[in-house]
Every structure is written in C-alpha cells, then in structure tokens.
Amino acid sequence: MELIVQKFGGSSVADAEKIKAAAQRVAQSFRKGNQVVAVVSACGQTTDELFALAEEITDRPSTRELDMLVSTGEQMSIALMAMAIHALGHDAISFTGAQVGIVTDSQHTKARILKINTKKIKEELDRGKIVVVAGYQGVDAYNNITTLGRGGSDATAVALAALLKADLCEIFTDVDGIYTADPRIVPEARKLDRISYDELLELASLGAKVMQARSIEFAKRYNVPLRVRPCFNNSEGTTICQEVREMEENVVSGVTVTKDEAKVIIRGIPDRPGLAARIFREMAQSNVNVDMIIQNIGTHGQANITFTVPKAELDAAMEAVRKIQGEICAQEVSADSNVAKLSVVGIGMRSHCGIAEKMFHALAEEEINIQMISTSEIKISCIIDEAQAGRAAKAVHKAFGLERPGRPGS
Ligand code: ADP
Ligand code: ASP
Ligand code: MG
C-alpha cells in the first residue's frame, strides 16, 4: 500500500463535470489499494474573481481580510470534491488548512508553512477514508487564516507529501506536463519526460506558472517524488527528480517569458561611492523586491542606474525613488512597465559556452532590442519590449532546437 498526494489545480475542478472526473482519478488510485490525500484548488477562476471583488470595495484592502476572503474558494471546492467521492461509493472527508493544523507565519497573502500536524490526516487515512485538504491556505499562530501566495496549492501538496512521507506527489493540471516553453506562447513547445528540481525551480521563478516556485524548493529540500500530469488524459506527464549526469547534456531545457516586471530608470546621478547603496536601501525599506540592476560606466562624473521590480511594486518603488531624488542629485527618474523578461534555462549551461551568443543572435535576427541582461549558473535573462515577447520566445525556442524530439537544447 502506497500513500499518494494528488493535487488538482483550478482548471481541473472548474465545474461539476470536472470535479466528478477528478474524483474518479482519486477513486481509481484508492481502489488500487493506496491511501490518498487529495489537495484541491479553488474552482476555475474563483480566486481571481474574489480578488477582483475586493478591489471593487477598496484599492487598499487589508491583507488579513483578503486571506479571509480568498481562502473561501478552496473551502468550496474541497466540500464538492468530498461529495463527488462519496457519490462514487467511497468514504472521504474534507478539511480546511486550519483544521489539519497547517501552521504558517503571519505574512498574509504570501505566508510560509512552518509546520503541519499530520496526526489527524493519518488517523482518517487509517480509518480507510480519502482525505481532501484545501490547498493554498493555513493559519498563523494567532488563528488568523493565511494564504500561501498565488499557485499556493502546489505548496500545500508538496509540504503534505514531504511530511506524510508520501510515495508520490502528483500535480494534476491542464497541460500534459512540463514543456520546453509555455505551450500557449510557443505552440511548438515539447513535453519533457524528466526535469531536475533545479531547472524547474528556475523555470518557475522566471515565469513558467505551471508550478509555484516555492513548492519546488520544498520538493527539492525534502526529495519529494514529484510528477506533473494532465488531469484530462492518462499521459504519464513529467517526472521531477534530482539531477542525473545525462541531464548535463541538456544545454537548454526551457524558455520562459514573464510580463510581471517593470523597469525603473534613474538618470544623471553623481558617479561616487554610496549612491547605489542609498537607492537600494530605500527599496529594501519600502519592501520592494529588486531583480536585475545595471549601472553604466560613468561619463563626465555622471551615471545612470536601471533596475527591475515586480509590476505590483512599481508604485512603491517610484514613490521611494522620488523621495530621495533630491538627496541623490538625480536629474531624471522614469518608469517603463511595457517590458518582458525572456529567459533560457538549462543545467548544461554550466559546462557549455556560446549559449548567450545563440540567444542574442536569435533576438538580433528578429530585430529585437535587448534592454538589460542578467545571468546565473543555469540561466540567461534579457529584458525586452513587452510587445515583442511572444515572437522573441518562439525565435529563441527555435534557435536551441527545443521543438525537436530527442535531447533538447543541444
Ligand atoms: P493549475 O490550475 O492546474 O494550477 P496553472 O494555470 O497554475 O494550472 O498552470 C498550468 C499552466 O501553466 C498551463 O496551462 C500553461 O499555460 C502554463 N505554463 C507556463 N509555462 C509552462 C511550461 N513550461 N510547461 C507547461 N505549462 C506551462
Ligand atoms: N487558488 C489559488 C490561486 O489561484 C491557489 C492555486 O490555484 O494553487 O492562486
Ligand atoms: Mg497553479
């Protein structure tokens, strides 16, 4: 008998028929003699709709009340899932995050799981029940409901799988697995049979929303056997595992695009020590997450600094920069939110050269201008014009031959 955690994303439980189909999946695994914990997201676009509703009330809702509101989406879907399993003749019981003791810190809307009391889940499993747990939510030390950041049901599933020492954690979604690029942006993208935690973590952090980045960090740390599978057919999906030697041959395994960042440009600041420190201290104090930074070589004693921040934090970033504009003697401050970040990711980059050249060449051929560049051990990212993002992704995907069966990116 194995213990399996199965997570169903919003699209997999979008309506009654889909909930019934997802329940069938759970029942199938249960009938094979497995213990099953189902983690369920809110149905369809419910979470987006709840956020939109809050925005209609106020543009500055309290984050505690937001969590109280959006967590109701999952409370609805777990009850429906449990009923659908009952209808198939099996015993099931649903629990909210608080009910199964998913304790988090108090950072509303982006809380981290601190501990989970698995006793109750284990007791119900041992009584022969299928346990249905609400994804995305927990409770802090003061009994406030919290949520785990968008896509957070993945984190619930992975954390439960780790702490229950599950034999497998299956993430059911609306695509056949992890692809070399978002198939909605690059239709030629190809499904990967296997990918390492590190590569998937980079892909997810750089915009591939197929799994929440934080959940992959957790899966890697606890070595959770993980698979991303389609909910609507029987394909095996993609297995996520620790890196194996042959993966090094995959120079590039994927391409991502994100439109979630914006650029802040500070022109004409004196080229002297301490000013960058001053600017980024102000960003840190305003809780703005800075991603890429470039500073040009000073000319005539003056320099420009450009950096990117999440679009959602652009207003806070601009407010902070304007506050110190006089103090840092900046001549001009501006912002550009029509940018996209295009990245290529692959473990094999560590041992191969020429990757940047290939990427930049593909962009040049399309006459796409690169505004900023950043690299790490296994990724290269470029900031480009948002309107060119789709075309850029397709061109770079093609340049690395990712659509071809066989080894990607070589
Ligand atoms: P769920 O509701 O199941 O959590 P999500 O919408 O969060 O599903 O994630 C699935 C979506 O992720 C897919 O529909 C796809 O458009 C998108 N996606 C982005 N990048 C990739 C990728 N590299 N591979 C597969 N899907 C991707
Ligand atoms: N329902 C939540 C969201 O839309 C959590 C999830 O889907 O994983 O972000
Ligand atoms: Mg998701």
Image (cartoon, rainbow, N blue to C red):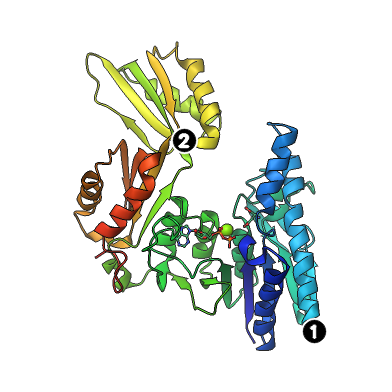
Residue drawn where x is 35% and y is 19% of the image:
267
Left or right placement of residue 12 versus residue 74 in this view: left
Q: Amino acid at mark 1?
A: Gly
* Above or below, comparing residue 49 to residue 39 in the picture: above
Query: Mark 2: which secondary structure?
Result: strand
**In which quarter of the view is residue 329 placed?**
top left
Q: Is residue 119 visible?
A: no
Residue drawn where x is 49% and y is 17% of the image:
322
Asked whether 280 or 52 is in front, the reply is: 52
Q: Which quadrant would the N terminus be assigned to in this image?
A: bottom right
Residue at which label 1 appears: 89
* Above or below, comparing residue 294 to residue 218 in the picture: above
Left or right placement of residue 353 versus residue 166 in this view: left
**In which quarter of the view is residue 248 placed?**
bottom left
Q: Position of residue 208 (x, y in %)?
A: 46, 55
Q: Which mark is residue 12?
A: none
Residue at which label 2 appears: 309
Q: What's the CA distance linking mark 1 and mark 2?
A: 51 Å
